[in-house]
Image: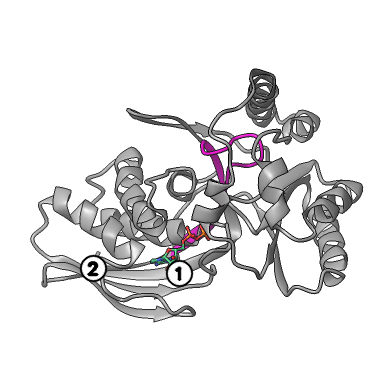
Amino acid sequence: MEEIKVFCPATIANVSCGFDVLGLALDAVGDEMIVRKVPEKGIHITKIKGQDLPLAADKNVAGVAGLALLEQSGYSGGFEIEIDKRIKPGSGIGSSAASSAGAVWAMNELLGRPFSNLELVKFAMQGEKLASDVAHADNVAPAIYGGFTLVRSYDPLDIVTIPTPPELYATVIHPQIEIKTSDSRKILKSTIPMEKGIRQWGNLGGLIAGLFQNDYDLIGRSLEDHIVEPIRSILIPGFDNIKANALKADALGGGISGSGPSIFALSKGKETAEKVAQSMRETYQKVGIPFDIHVSKINAQGVKPIV
Ligand code: ADP
């Protein structure tokens, strides 16, 4: 195989109580990418459609992640990459992660799969480092493995895949305002009171158990973040109303997607997820900021070929 076209999923990091460790992949939102083998060494990004992003390999996350893989591969040639960018950068649904994960997954396929998923996550994390100065894995891990993933440890890197209940859907609203990841990190406190920690890891354990047991009520009860959301949500106009009305429309729960400004809700069944989308639409029309809304099944596969 000399060329492959792939779907690179958008991802929701944190998922409420799993700050910096939990993430999930979406199915209805993502970029497309064509990757082909070429004799010239290095990564050559030849086309980017949809967004104004750098073509230079060392300035684009797809290039940086790809170069990290190339260095370890022993392959004497290089790769050409075309990106159809459908996830807006800075939206909080893993725009940079989609490109980093898509590039290394596709290259691994073209080389005959010499690398494991865990190794691909490590390469993709180099792209994340370029985007936000931190080599975090909570978006690239679900983008590569699919479904829900837990970053149990960074040193050594240990990714745990979590099963997805079959009827689980996500609704995501992206208010079109810019929140810099660095700003939304700066406002967080570096210590947490013990009592908040206890509530948070109780919820994270509950969420993981709910996902394993297909227990939608437990998932809903556990989608509570006592540490980050109360602080970060101040940066997102209309957050409290969006969340309250999503719950009234029967969402299981929700929160901030990644570092925002996107807000997500999880629901049992597509019909409820659509009802939640409608409630978000009605709520946000009153705020007066343009927005996009997506309803998506959880993507079990991660990056996948488009045939
Ligand atoms: P999101 O908040 O949606 O996860 P990020 O903030 O992680 O998005 O990443 C966006 C940053 O990464 C921007 O500064 C953007 O210029 C940079 N970037 C570099 N290459 C890419 C790429 N291929 N796709 C998206 N963003 C990229």
- Compare residues 115 and 197 and report the one nearer the observer: 197
User: Which residue shows up at 78% across the image and 48% down it?
Assistant: 269
Corner quadrant of residue 224: top right
Residue depicted at x 21% and y 58%: 67
Range of residues picked out in magenta: 7-24
Tell me the quadrant of the picture where the C terminus can be found. bottom left
Tell me if 306 is positioned left or right of 42 in this view.
right
Distance, label 1 to label 2, CA atoms, is: 17 Å
Q: How is the image coloured?
A: one colour
Q: In the image, is residue 21 part of the stretch drawn in magenta?
A: yes
Name the quadrant where ligand 1 sits: bottom left
Tell me: residue 14, above or below residue 197: below
In the rendered structure, the answer to whether residue 56 lies left or right of residue 242 reads left
Q: Quadrant of the N terminus?
A: bottom left
State which quadrant residue 28 falls in: bottom right
Task: State left or right for residue 63 relative to residue 27.
Answer: left
Residue nearest the viewer, comparing 146 with 56:
56
Give the number of the disc on residue 259: none
User: According to the image, label 2 marks what residue?
Assistant: 2
What is the count of numbered marks? 2
Choose mark 1 or mark 2, whichever is in front: 1
Q: Is residue 280 left or right of residue 8?
A: right
Q: Is residue 180 visible?
A: yes
Q: Position of residue 93 (x, y in %)?
A: 57, 57
Q: Residues within 10 Å of mark 1 (few under 14, many from 20)?
A: many
**Label 1 sits on residue:** 32
